[in-house]
Image (tube, rainbow, N blue to C red):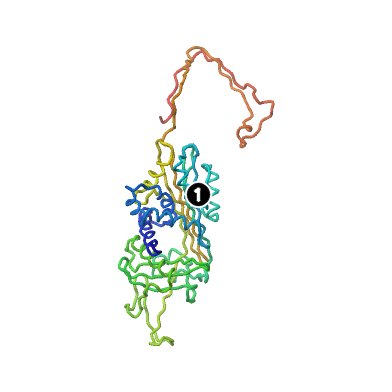
Amino acid sequence: MDQEGWLAALGSYAERLHARAGQGHHVVSPLGAWMVVALCATLAGDEERDAWADILGADPLDAASFAAGLLAEPHPLVGAGAGLWVRSAYATDRFHQWRDELPPVIDSGDIPTQEQADAWARQRTLGLIKAFPLRITGEVVLLLASALASKVSWDVPFQVVAAAALHPSPWATRLEWVLQPPRVGGRRGHRQFLVATERAGTVAVHLTGARGGLLVGSVIADDARRAAGDVLAVAEEIVTAEARAPGAIPHLSLFDLPLGEGEVWSISEEAAETKAPDGREEQVLSVLPAWSADTDLDLDHDALGFPAAARALEQVLVAGGYRHAARQLAMARYSAIGFEAAAVTGFMVATSRVRTQPGIRRTAHVRFGHPFAVVAAAFDDSRRDPRAAPISTRWNGVPVFSAWVSEPCDAEPIPGS
């Protein structure tokens, strides 16, 4: 499949992931989630290949190979990493075969502690994600994760201007300062234009980039009632096309649009000196707010592929009852000087019950049915808990209270029970 096909596959997955995140303010990494599922795709059986292809937008084996290639040769401006950890007692020969086929750049080992997993997330995301998205317990037997991070400065920074520049937008009164691109064009500057789309109507586009190859696009529809999913899909199509070939998306001519005020933009006309051969010059001047977002998203949904991946992984683990969970933590900040974003996608398979084996159990039932003694003694708790204040060694083990219980009474109910 060519690059255009892969972009379409990732775009389709992105639509489903954004739908999962909902209509509210959020940031996600469709690529991060897609890669985790794709790495499991070589485990898909022949009878499941069509279902996996629908999820990944490509043949499962091809998707796994594509994901492996992304990890093996990361983009210079996008830190990409993955990790696979397993409790050795649960790994079968088939698991080891699958793991050995994965790229060697994937971190591996025994199940990390929570502190180790959190540290991995921080290290792999340039410190932007502070904690691993899943809680690591003793029941976790397999852990698979991806991490993506980018922290760049714009080639041409924005100017910061008064929020009145957003008037008559409702945000003009909510904000004090906003971003305005300087009047610098070109591939490394700020490109701004209008585009006619079938899915989201007429949209305005602002593109700016960072040296080294990261293009960030903002796309707004002329009608605020447009569904978020439609505008997101159009934005992905425009930005990916422009990233591959600047100017690939046809621009609307402002001379083909009506003059006057609109909901999102206004078009005016004036006499001016111009170098255009036909004497008609046009320009788009954008004003954008700075923004940041942090999202914690549950990924356990059939359309995103994690239940299918869990079923596949369970087949390469020691037989038993399992459960799974998948979450993504993502963040992004867009400012006058640059852009930073990161996401960690965590996917785990855990035992659903304590594993048992045949054996013998003895039980003693003790009945305090006649007078008995009680003793309370002091001890140095700082030996067990470093947060506790140490006591004098003289107190250690000293009996403080003692009793002989010969007249029991009824226990009182616990308040609120």
Helix, strand or loop at label 1? It is: strand
Whole-percent x, y for residue 10 in the image: 39, 59
Please give the name of the residue rendered at 46% of the width and 17% of the height, measured from the top-left corner: 365
Whole-percent x, y for residue 2 in the image: 39, 64
Closer to the camera in the image, 399 or 411: 399
Q: Is residue 376 above or below residue 60?
A: above
Which quadrant is home to the C terminus? top left
* Quarter-of-image position of residue 310: top left
Q: Is residue 23 visible?
A: no
Q: Is residue 120 above or below residue 89?
A: below
Q: Badge 1 is on which residue?
A: 83
Q: Is residue 73 above or below residue 414?
A: below
Residue type at mark 1? Gly
Whole-percent x, y for residue 411 in the image: 45, 21
Which quadrant is home to the N terminus? bottom left
* Quarter-of-image position of residue 194: bottom left
Please give the name of the residue rendered at 38% of the width and 72% of the height, measured from the top-left corner: 249
Q: Is residue 380 above or below residue 70?
A: above
